[in-house]
């Protein structure tokens, strides 16, 4: 089942001779449960693409369909709600709320949506990520790797249709990076979670099920399906 699809996705900044085509007709699909890495150098368009996939920015033209819905047909408020319910984000800088403890950070998206956390599901995620003894800690009392695990738990807890990971190991040392990637892989399989990750790191990308390479705003190689 196709969970994510882009069609002739374009993003242009500026106009005329100074126009920059950050995305220039991107087409690819992601199936339910897949772990896909999008790899590219700085300036290749991968970050712009991730922002489009998550509805954080609107394209110049083209479409992004998530779980059967063309997200750019939604008004801003509708898109915000859709994003909160359907899309989980894991950022390079973790984006944890410093005054909330680990548990409060994990359940925050669910509570913002006015729902009750599924405590049994959260416990399973927390145990898988090895956070069971850190639930009362504040983020600044955790290592970088532990903070990234909290970010992964937060993304998983809301049971999103898809998780978008933006250079999730960018601020971690090589050993911690491999540990975090191993956990992403495990959680993808164990919770049947669809993940799309952008990275510039070839070694990290190899741990995904499929690699798509982007260059100059276009799909350069890989199987876009």
Image (cartoon, helix red, strand yellow):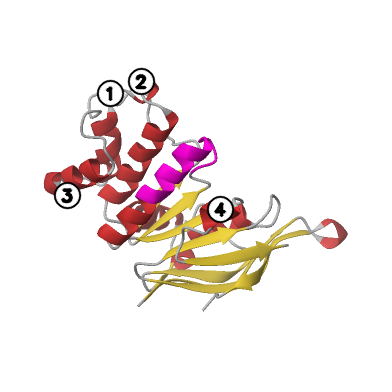
What residue did someone put label 2 on?
A: 141
What residue did someone put label 1 on?
A: 137
Residue 171 forms part of the magenta stretch:
yes
Q: Is residue 115 visible?
A: no
Report x, y in % for residue 199: 57, 52
Q: Is residue 142 left or right of residue 210?
A: left
Residue 108 numbered mark, or none? none
Closer to viewer: mark 4 or mark 3: 4
Residue depicted at 39% across the width and 67% down the height: 34
Task: Estimate how packed mark 4 is, as few (under 14), some (14 to 19) or many (20 or more) residues with alpha carbons within 10 Å.
Answer: few
Q: In the image shown, does 128 or 220 lie closer to the viewer?
A: 128
Real-space Cα distance between discs 4 and 3? 31 Å
What residue did someone put label 4 on?
A: 203
What residue did someone put label 3 on?
A: 121
Real-space Cα distance between discs 3 and 1? 20 Å
Q: Is residue 146 above or below residue 158?
A: above
Give the quarter of the image for residue 126.
top left
Report x, y in % for residue 214: 65, 63
Name the N-terminal-most of marks 1 and 4. 1
Marks 3 and 4: in contact by CB < 8 Å? no
Give the quarter of the image for residue 185.
bottom left
Q: Which residues are magenta?
A: 169-183
Q: Is residue 46 left or right of residue 31?
A: right
Q: Main secondary structure of the magenta part?
A: helix
């Amino acid at each position: 089942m196709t969970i994510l699809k882009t069609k002739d996705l374009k993003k242009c900044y500026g106009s005329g001779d100074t126009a920059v085509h950050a995305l220039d007709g991107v087409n690819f699909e992601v199936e339910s449960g897949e772990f896909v890495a999008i790899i590219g150098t700085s300036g290749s368009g991968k970050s712009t693409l991730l922002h489009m996939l998550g509805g954080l920015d609107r394209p110049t033209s083209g479409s992004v369909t998530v779980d059967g819905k063309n997200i750019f047909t939604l008004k801003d408020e509708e898109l915000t709600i859709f994003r909160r319910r359907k899309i989980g984000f894991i950022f390079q800088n973790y984006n944890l709320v410093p005054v909330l403890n680990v548990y409060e950070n994990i359940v925050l998206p669910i509570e913002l949506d006015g729902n009750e956390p599924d405590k049994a599901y959260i416990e399973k995620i927390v145990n898988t990520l090895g956070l069971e003894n850190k639930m009362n800690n504040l983020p600044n009392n955790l290592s970088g790797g532990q903070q990234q695990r909290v970010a992964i738990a937060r993304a998983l807890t809301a049971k999103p249709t898809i998780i978008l990971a933006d250079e999730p190991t960018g601020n971690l040392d090589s050993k911690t990076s491999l540990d975090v990637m191993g956990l992403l892989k495990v959680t993808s399989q164990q919770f049947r979670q669809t993940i799309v990750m952008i990275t510039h790191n070839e070694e990290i990308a190899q741990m995904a099920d499929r690699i798509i390479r982007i260059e100059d705003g276009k799909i350069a190689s890989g199987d876009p399906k």
